Image (spheres, helix red, strand yellow):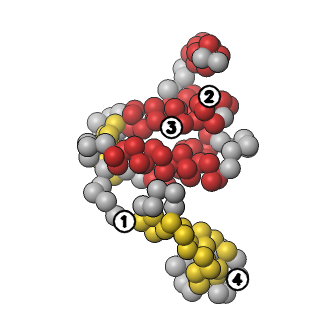
Amino acid sequence: MKCPYCDTQDSKVLDSRPTEEGASIRRRRECLKCKRRFTTYEKIEGVPIMVIKKDKGREPFDREKLLRGIVKACEKRPVSVEIMENMVSTIENIIQNSLDREITSVRIGDLVMEQLKGIDEVAYVRFASVYRQFKDINTFMQELRKLLMEK
């Protein structure tokens, strides 16, 4: 496994344990060169899920892309990486457990918003502003009003 810090190929496994769902193994590793530690996940490769984009194009579901979007929404917010990774796992499980092998990007965005709403309202509004492509302040305010009314 390549070290994310120094790109050395040699590392040793310090700890292995199954994730909560039991569908993957979490491994703590230590680079033999720089001695820094990092985490890797090993999981069963399933049937690929295709995402139908808004422009009708298709691309394979990308867990890392989903995580990057959530990380961006949660930037400078009190949301741990573990919580964000759990959100991605939850969303991925919902997608994998559906009988469809295709999902729209709109549905994925809705799943992210459902997760963020219960975790951090500021991150929720940040994600919504990009996902829903707010055109002006009025659209932004409508979303805030909806959020406040649900409390």
Picture layout, residue 129 above or below residue 49: above
* Residue that mark 3 sits on: 112
Q: Residues within 10 Å of mark 2 (few under 14, many from 20)?
A: many
* Residue that mark 2 sits on: 125
* Residue that mark 1 sits on: 44
- Counting residues from the N terminus, which is met first, the one under dot 3 or under dot 4? 4
Picture layout, residue 32 above or below residue 62: below
Q: Is residue 45 visible?
A: yes
Q: Residue at x 54, y 23 (%)?
A: 134
Label 3, secondary structure: give it: helix
- Counting residues from the N terminus, which is met first, the one under dot 1 or under dot 3? 1
Query: Between tags 1 and 2, which lies in front?
Result: 1
Query: Between tags 1 and 3, which lies in front?
Result: 1
Q: Quadrant of residue 140?
A: top right
- Counting residues from the N terminus, which is met first, the one under dot 2 or under dot 3? 3
Label 2, secondary structure: give it: helix
Picture layout, residue 130 above or below residue 77: above
Q: Residue at x 56, y 52 (%)?
A: 85
Q: Is residue 81 left or right of residue 96?
A: right
Instruction: Report the Cα–Cα distance between label 1 and label 3.
Output: 23 Å
Q: Is residue 128 left or right of residue 57?
A: right
